[in-house]
């Protein structure tokens, strides 16, 4: 009896030792993958749109969190976790957060492999390495939510579900697109649970968990329910307006894209495994969102979104599927087809996808945090030094509040001005309701900055009033432009910027609207002449059913406005239909605001689009007359 007991104890100890050894081995493998795939941190800030908002969001988090919480922008208050820079301790916090998330994501890949009963450890290690090699914080969050809900589906344990909901809301507070994709996984998980269990009590419990975590996390981040709900409403609006305002239209190679789409759609019908189909359902919206995000803004920085997500998606599908060879083959072909299209269409700024093969050097750099931060800070200050203003301009502004329009916040950073950003933050590239957002910017009250630095950008026609994607800056945000010109007066002008100062009274009388008229695209519209003030054209157009489908599944088509001058010269700019409804600028036409040069009068305009079958032929137009106050004549 005693011998039998000792034998059992020995077997138990041996099992425990093997289990402990297995855990140590697992942790060592995860650590090695983590080190070898550790990312490079390019965290200096510079002059330009992207660098400006990175600096701005980081600076506000460290210095003016109350303002940051109320901004309307695709990034949330915790944006610095994804796009850090060397302001305060933002970089260190981001590195710790992203590293913890990365380790957790790698561990979840192994955990899922264990649950699915995979015995080939080498295959799992290879998958974890490749997926970790290509992904960053956004897809670590989305991928972790996907894996956690797969585990929840298999094990019916509430903890993975709770953690996934928490990660989804963290993702939402970092960037709207991350949060929407992650929350869609949670929502589909709830529906799958209801479909298979028919358990309404479980449904109420899950909704309660989502509501509770969403409420608590929102209060912790925003500290105010009203501000939190305003953020959620803004997130909803931003998610709907992205495709209309930022579309690029390179000629895609559909010989490559059609097979890609076919393979992505038919694979769950070919591979009839239940777990694969569940994984597909959970991934459906994030896949669609990545597709939309990629093909709306088809430059190299955005095209890689879908390519990168496919590594996460197929890595998880391969772990889940028992048909490894078939799944691997389809995964490889789809990624190659998508990547091949990027190469063939000469994607804007294309230079290939580059990665450091071994991330140990990157890890070693961040370990020397003080030196790393110091070097990056020096580099950043050198980058923005050319936007340091003259002593005369800095003396004029002094300690008064100032904002930069449309986006060059490096003026604020380089001159250490007292920054008061507008609510729509930089240029609002996303069509929002002007009644509730843009109209609140640059008004005559204490919430508006004392000065506005309106920086100038060369356009594709050699003028100074350019915007993004061959647009005319005065057409991008009609409500903001109106408020700026109405409530501020021009104080100084240089070749680089215009300096406006907040006035004491409005400069314009009430805006008058002309009669509604109906025209067709490609038809010239006579522009009535007004001796004084501003003439703008409000344009209302709508998509056909085919156009709505194209916009939903792919992207909005391109719209153009042709300006004809008295001498017959024609200039063409792109425009956004949503903002055109608030007014496209006509007269006085401005191209060189830094000089006293006067442009000719616009006599006609013509509106065009690139795909007539997607837009109704008839459009409604209405001229808008903005008259200056009589005492200011």
Image (cartoon, helix red, strand yellow):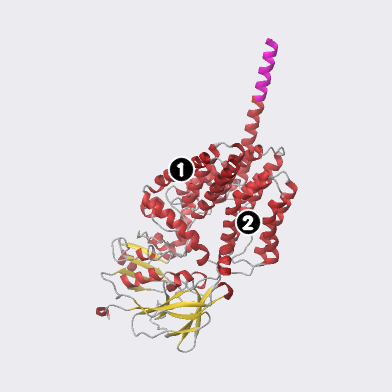
- Foreground residue among 514 and 568: 514
Magenta stretch holds residue 319: no
Q: Which image quadrant is residue 260 in? A: bottom right
- Left or right for 582, reference 314: left
Q: What type of secondary structure mainly makes up the magenta span?
A: helix
* Up/down of 375 relative to 587, above or below: above
Indicate the quadrant containing the C terminus: top left, top right, bottom left or bottom right. bottom left
Task: Identify the residue at horizontal 48%, vertical 47% (top origin).
Answer: 170
The mark lying in front, picked from 1 and 2, is 1
The reply to whether discs 1 and 2 touch (Cβ–Cβ < 8 Å) is no
- Foreground residue among 206 and 158: 206
Q: Which residues are magenta?
A: 1-15
Task: Identify the residue at horizontal 65%, vertical 29% (top origin).
Answer: 21
Mark 1–mark 2 Cα distance, whole angstroms, equals 32 Å
Question: How far across and down, in percent of the image, does residue 560 sit?
Answer: 52, 76
Q: Residue furthest left?
A: 631
Q: Residue furthest bottom?
A: 567
Q: Which mark is residue 213?
A: 1
For the question of whether residue 358 can be seen, the reply is: no
Question: How far across and down, in percent of the image, does residue 111 sit?
Answer: 62, 38
**SS of the residue under disc 1:** helix
Identify the residue under disc 2: 307
Magenta stretch holds residue 3: yes
Task: Identify the residue at horizontal 70%, vertical 11% (top origin).
Answer: 3
- Foreground residue among 470 and 165: 165
- Left or right for 71, reference 291: left
* Up/down of 118 relative to 137, above or below: above
Question: How far across and down, in percent of the image, does residue 439 sit?
Answer: 36, 66
Q: Which mark is residue 502?
A: none
Q: Sequence order check: which comes first, mark 1 or mark 2? A: 1
Neighbours of disc 1 within 10 Å: few (<14), some (14-19), many (20+): some
């Amino acid at each position: 009896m005693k011998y039998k007991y000792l034998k059992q104890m020995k077997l138990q100890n041996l099992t425990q030792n093997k289990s402990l050894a297995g855990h140590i081995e697992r942790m060592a493998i995860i650590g090695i993958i983590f080190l070898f795939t550790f990312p490079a941190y390019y965290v200096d800030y510079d002059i330009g749109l992207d660098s400006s908002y990175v600096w701005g969001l980081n600076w506000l988090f460290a210095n003016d969190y109350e303002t940051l919480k109320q901004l309307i922008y695709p990034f949330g208050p915790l944006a610095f976790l994804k796009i850090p820079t060397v302001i305060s301790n933002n970089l260190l916090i981001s590195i710790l957060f992203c590293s913890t998330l990365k380790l957790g994501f790698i561990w979840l890949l192994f955990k899922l492999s264990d649950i699915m009963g995979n015995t080939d450890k080498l295959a799992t290690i290879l998958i974890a390495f490749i997926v970790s090699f290509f992904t960053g914080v956004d897809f670590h969050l989305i991928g972790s939510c996907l894996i956690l809900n797969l585990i929840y589906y298999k094990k019916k344990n509430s903890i993975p579900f709770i953690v996934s909901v928490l990660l989804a809301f963290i993702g939402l507070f970092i960037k709207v697109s991350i949060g929407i994709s992650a929350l869609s996984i949670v929502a589909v998980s709830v529906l799958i649970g209801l479909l298979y269990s028919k358990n309404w009590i479980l449904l109420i419990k899950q909704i309660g968990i989502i509501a509770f975590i969403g409420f608590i996390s929102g209060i912790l981040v925003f500290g105010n329910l009203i501000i939190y709900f305003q953020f959620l409403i803004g997130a909803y609006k931003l998610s709907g307006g992205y495709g209309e305002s930022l579309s690029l239209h390179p000629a895609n190679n559909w010989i490559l894209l059609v097979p890609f789409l076919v393979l992505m759609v038919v694979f769950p019908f070919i591979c009839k495994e239940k777990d694969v189909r569940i994984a597909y359902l959970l991934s459906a919206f994030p896949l669609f969102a990545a597709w939309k995000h990629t093909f709306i803004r088809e430059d190299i920085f955005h095209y890689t979104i879908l390519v990168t997500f496919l590594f996460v998606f197929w890595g998880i599908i391969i772990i889940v599927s028992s048909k490894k060879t078939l799944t691997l083959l389809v995964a490889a072909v789809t990624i190659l087809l998508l990547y091949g299209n990027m190469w063939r269409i000469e994607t804007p700024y294309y230079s290939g996808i580059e990665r450091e093969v071994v991330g140990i050097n990157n890890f070693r750099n961040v370990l020397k945090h003080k030196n790393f931060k110091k070097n990056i800070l020096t580099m950043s200050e050198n980058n923005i030094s050319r936007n340091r203003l003259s002593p005369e301009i800095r003396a004029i502004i002094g300690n008064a509040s100032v904002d930069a329009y449309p986006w060059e916040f490096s003026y604020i950073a380089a001159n250490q001005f007292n920054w008061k950003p507008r609510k729509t933050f930089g240029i609002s590239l996303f069509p929002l309701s002007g009644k509730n957002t843009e109209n609140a910017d640059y008004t005559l009250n204490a919430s508006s900055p004392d000065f506005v630095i309106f920086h100038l950008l060369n356009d594709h026609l050699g003028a100074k009033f350019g915007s993004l994607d061959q647009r005319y800056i005065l057409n991008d945000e009609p409500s903001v432009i109106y408020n700026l010109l109405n409530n501020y007066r021009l104080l100084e002008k240089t070749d680089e910027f215009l300096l406006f100062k907040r006035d004491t009274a409005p400069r314009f009388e009430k805006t008058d609207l002309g009669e509604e008229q109906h025209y067709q695209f490609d038809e010239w519209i006579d522009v009535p002449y007004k001796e004084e003030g501003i003439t703008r054209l409000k344009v209302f157009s709508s998509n056909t059913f085919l156009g709505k489908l194209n916009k939903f599944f792919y992207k909005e088509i391109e719209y153009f406005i042709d300006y004809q001058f008295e001498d017959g010269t024609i200039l063409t700019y792109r425009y956004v239909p949503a903002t055109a409804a608030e007014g496209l600028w006509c007269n006085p036409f401005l191209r060189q605001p830094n000089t006293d040069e006067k442009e000719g009068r616009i006599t006609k305009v013509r509106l065009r689009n690139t795909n007539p079958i997607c837009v109704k032929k008839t459009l409604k137009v209405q001229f808008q007359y903005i008259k200056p106050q009589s005492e200011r004549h």
